[in-house]
Image: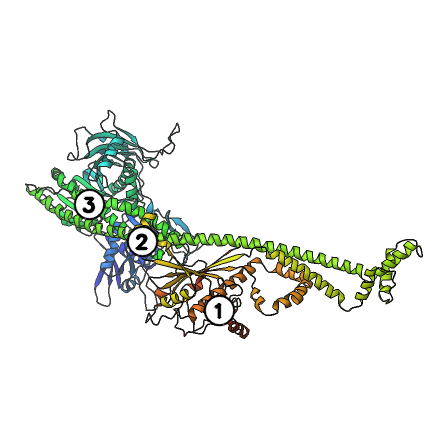
Amino acid sequence: MAEEGRTHGQNVMVWVDKKDGKEYRLSFEHAKLLYMVSFYAVSSKNEDQPETWMRELPLNVMMYEGIVAGKLDFDYAPISRLFSYVEEGGGTVVKRRFLNFSEEGMSAIEDLREQEFLLGLKLTNHDDITMTAVQVSHKGRELLAQLAPMLRLEVEEFVYHHRKYASNPHPKKDLKNVLITPDDILLVTLNGYEAPSGVSETEDVSYVTSPFLPWLLRRGDLAMSDNADRAWESGKGVNQVKGDLSESIILSQVYVMLCEWLPVGPNQLNSLMNRMGAGRRYAGGLMTSAVDREPDRQSLVTRPGLTKIRFLDFAWLDAVNVEAEIVFPEAEGVKQVEHVGIHISVDGNVCFGARVEAILDRLADDVSMDLMCRMLVDLEQDSSQILDDLLSPTQRAVLDIVYRSNPADRTKFRAIFCDKAEPVLTSSNYMDHGEYENELRQVLGSIREAHDVGSKGEVIVLGSTGALIIGHAIRKFDKLVLAYCNTASLSQFQSHLFTRTLKTVKDLQLLKDTCNLSHQDPRSVDKARQLQDALSKELGFLNQALESVVDGVRGLIIPALPSDEMGRNVHQALNIKLRVQGLDKMSSDLRKLIRGCTGTFEALGPVLKSLQVIQEASDGEAMVSATQKLVQIATATKVESASYRVMVSVLAAAFALIMGDSLISARAKALDQIVTENVNGTGGTGFDLAAATNLGSSLASNTTVDESTWPLAQWAVALDQIPIFSILLHLIIMGIGLYILSKVLANKPIPTRDCVYLLATPVFLPRLMDYLTGQKAQEGVSRDLAHRGDNISDMKREKRDLVLKTFKFTPEGGRLRWRGKAPQVSITIDSKLSTITKVALHREEVSGVAWLDNIPFFTTLKRFVLIPLMLALAPLRFLVRRYFTTTTFLKMRGDVDDELFETFMNILKRKGVFELSEVLPEIEEDDDNKIVETVIEDTSNINPPPPVVQQEEPEMDDDMASEKMEEGDGHFSAGQRSPAGGSAAGSKPTSPKSPNDGFPETSVAVEGSPA
């Protein structure tokens, strides 16, 4: 049940809860705010429906849109806030900006949460930024069911995008949603509407200020500038504030101090004083933070709006006081006379002071809190830019790290002094959770304390970002107030430093995870190197800021307790001693955190260095392998060209044989007869080649041979009658030619090939050493690349934990086992961990079927049967070789390498090298069988299986190997699954893994080098 009425000038609705009969009174603004949240976040009706929540930033953006649309009667003011967004690459970026938030609206949200119409959820994002999300509860949904249609329409006017051609907006597609981008905050809909929100546009107001610094901070008596006679200029300026402001508190004779703490130090202060020309006749002048990139040029170009500095006084290596006139360009029509006093001390305390002469058409005795809030935001931004012109590059770098690349929008502690405030209230009225507190929260942040310190309305209100001191009499205790401001500003800097250090802790964890993924992601080492460089820079500046903070805490002075009653009240209200003790504890805790980060970073340094060395070695091996493959391709192309030339030569030889056969056959007899007759004059008139050709076939059948013919012709006629004589003559001559060609090619060096296999295979070291001793292996000692020092002296002094032993030998076995001559094996063993780390095979480059020459009578069969058949099919063979690419040829060579490697590993398995049952009762898969390095991209070899205990098998000789081959044993076939369960490099498995696998899969890098 809901009713409408008015209470204290506000429209309210009365709703009675049917469950408990309790009556609730809500203003129309509260009800509209609750209805606005219901479009984005409501509680679920059942377990299957998910819960939806509305984050704090989109909530404030939509409240601002309702305020500027005139549908929500709240005030708003620019407030510095941290928010985060997700980049296109998936990373989270934190940004700080001044946003137009409504403290009255957030107070209404808290009222709805207290009455349980809204539920709140606290959560933290990846950057440790705590935020609040809200949703409409079941109780709130029951209230909204009885909401007046008029209030619904007012809310729907600004939460929906109303299209001109549509009578009613779509409930989902036309609903405005908040989208955060790196450049702006946008309002978007599913129908394609997109427009920037004005929540990030701070409104400028016209004002006039004069420089101000308390006499306690001065080191001389030079009078400061006075702009009271220019107060009228503010009244002619433009007001950019949208809508009317409800003013609850009016201040009179306002002095503002913006305090912050920076890492200064004596050297930085001395450099600053030298830059400003301290001690010279005309100190100060225009200053800029721009760096002269072209000192050899005649002219210099700078940005518009410089800072004009007037030197006041200084104490050498203690403090310096100046006044600055800000001449930055403003929006058209805005008149601002910004003149501030600046105090910089060696302890890091920085103060900007200004006396408010006028804001718009309001003079110094009629200052609105709402207007002053916008003036303070403009002063904070401009003062940050002024200080940027005065600081050194190192100090700017520290601020950039601490404030996450947004130092221009950093907050400062605001100390506001005024002679009186209207209306005159006690301290409890300033914390009423109503209009007065909401007005103060726009300037001071969340209100923490309020104290009455005098009998004539002297009040001190303390907030999270500022303090309000009401009463001229309190000004004689400026020493206490300044000490409190220094403590509060240092506390602010410490909080930002702590938050930034937590970000560094997560970056260190990311660096550690990136290093652990180096064997899976080839780009992880480069990512880790970039992250290491960034963390090195960050930790350097964080340690520098920490030391400055520690020195700043030690330099804080606790003022003595005053003698009069008001002084004691002020001293008790500010409680400086307790705050200094808290800062000391915070700095100690922060020192532990940063030192822990530094230690973790230093511990990760050697790990990353070893990974870099391994990657560099892998890159070098990959480059060498790629180069050698190019050489192999060129060699293969050269071989194909040579084969083509040989084929042409064979065809030419065949043609020559045909011509020779024609000369020595029966046609030679006819030619001899024709020539004889022409010479003797017994027939014909001359030589007729056509006649000789025609007579050849007829005379070839004539078995009668005259003695007057040539002897060669007689033999030709006799041999021509022998069957297959021509074929045999071809084979004999071609055999002689191929024999000569083989002798010529035999003098050329045989190309060799190297293949390297990187492993991490555990072995039974005594049996492996016995096998190597029996093979008469030559031992050499090498050290891991990851543990090399920067120079030879470091290597000699430092004790090495990992010693690798390398053995070189030629394994036993016939040519049939090794498909030719046995390769030279180089095996590297980690004697401390009892593992094989590398196996290298150096073999002669032979054809994939060269081992068939070991079969008896195969050479004779090849010479007298296969070679003539190949010559007859030479054109077809040439086309087939042209069809198969060189890459396929190289893959076949890689299959031969894998077969030789599997043969060697099978020999070790038969020797019992991989039987670890006598050494380790249980083998952990993740620790003992981890692949050390992946040289080529083969994701099938990431998690190899543990070795299985095998019974020792008798070693095979050549006859047994031949029988195995004839029976079709798979480990002699290229491209099939190896006994280890792995496949050849670059090939896919063709059969399931055997349960009797003896050694894990490996990652292979093959390198070929023709001799």
User: What residue is rendered at 79% in x and 66% in y?
Assistant: 719
User: What residue is rendered at 33% in x and 33% in y?
Assistant: 305
Q: CA distance from mark 2 to mark 1?
A: 39 Å
Mark closest to the chain's N terminus, 3 or 1? 3
Mark closest to the chain's N terminus, 2 or 1? 2
Give the camera-side residue of 775 and 979.
Answer: 775
The residue mark sitting in front, 3 or 1, is 1
Judge from the rendering whether residue 639 lies leftward or rightward of residue 126; answer left or right.
right
Q: CA distance from mark 3 to mark 1?
A: 66 Å
- Label 1 sits on a secondary structure element that is loop
- Label 3 sits on a secondary structure element that is helix
Characterize the local packing of mark 2: few (<14), some (14-19) or many (20 or more) Cα atoms within 10 angstroms.
some
Marker disc for residue 373 = none
The amino acid pointed to by label 2 is Leu
Task: List the residue tagged with mark 3.
Answer: 550
Characterize the local packing of mark 3: few (<14), some (14-19) or many (20 or more) Cα atoms within 10 angstroms.
some
Residue 785 lies in what quarter of the image? bottom left
Task: List the residue tagged with mark 1.
Answer: 977
Please say whether residue 644 is visible from this viewpoint.
Answer: yes
